[in-house]
Structure formats: structure tokens, C-alpha cells
Amino acid sequence: MIDWILILSAGLLGWALGIAGMYIINQRKGGQHSVKEMEKKLDDYQHKVEEHFAKTADLIDNLTDSYQAVFSHLSESAEKLLTDEQIRHQLINRRSREVTIKYLKSDDDSEINTNPSVD
């Protein structure tokens, strides 16, 4: 009778170890598959982020070029359309604010900065 109990106990122990072993093996295989999927998702995400920033940089470059073209156009127009007196008057009115369009020649700029009340 003890032999049957030992055989039955060994069988149950083997069965339990088999189930535990299969569970661990399945978890590892599923985990590897999951890790590969996560690595692919991470790579895809990083690629999308890279594309996003590359496009953003291109758009900012285009925006910068557009601003430069506008400032250049305004500068050329100011030199052609305004008199020196009108330019001086505009600079005096803008004394407390930054002049963003440099439409004065360098000698006019130094004259105005040294003597702002000159009209």
C-alpha cells in the first residue's frame, strides 16, 4: 500500500512540476515575443519622432528664410521710399523700442545714436 502512495505522490509531483515548467516556458516565449514587439514599437516611435523634428527644422528654416525676405524687402523699400529725415523721425519715435529693420546706412545710424535730437 505504501508503494501505491509513493507512486501516486511521485506522479502528482511530476504532473505539478510539468505544469509549472510548461507555464514558465510559455511565459518566456511570450515574453520574448512581447519584447520584440515592444522593441519594434519603440523603433517605430523613435523614427516618427526623428521625422517630426526633421520636418519641424525644415519648416523653421523656411520660416526664417521668409522673415529674412520680408525684412530685406522692407529695408530696401524704406531706403527707396523714405527720406533721411523720415528715417530719423521714425528712429526717434522708436527710441525706447528695438529697431528690428535696419534700413539706415551705418553712417546714419551712428549719427542718430550719438545725437538723437537731430532732426
Image: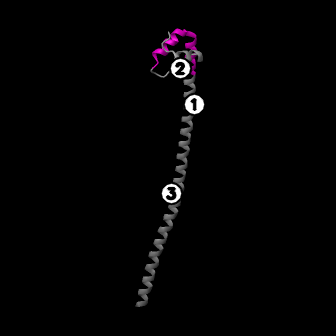
Location of residue 90 with respect to 48 vertically, above or below: above
Residue 68 seen by the camera: yes
- Name the main secondary structure of what is drawn in magenta: helix
Is 29 in front, or is 114?
A: 114
- Number of marks in the rendered image: 3
Residues in magenta, as a range: 69-95
Amino acid type at mark 1:
Asp
Mark nearer the N terminus (1 vs 3): 3
Location of residue 2 with respect to 102 vertically, above or below: below
Is 88 in front, or is 14?
A: 88
x and y percentages locating residue 113 in the rendered image: 52, 18
Q: Tell me whether circle 1 and circle 2 mark residues in contact (CB < 8 Å).
A: no
Q: Quadrant of the N terminus?
A: bottom left
Amino acid type at mark 2:
Ile
Tag 2 secondary structure: loop
Mark nearer the N terminus (2 vs 3): 3
Q: Label 2 belongs to which residue? A: 101
Mark nearer the N terminus (1 vs 2): 1
Q: Label 3 belongs to which residue? A: 34
Is 47 in front, or is 79?
A: 79
**Residue 117 covered by magenta stretch:** no
Q: Label 1 belongs to which residue? A: 61
Is 91 in front, or is 71?
A: 91
The span from disc 1 to disc 3 (Cα, nearest Å) is: 40 Å
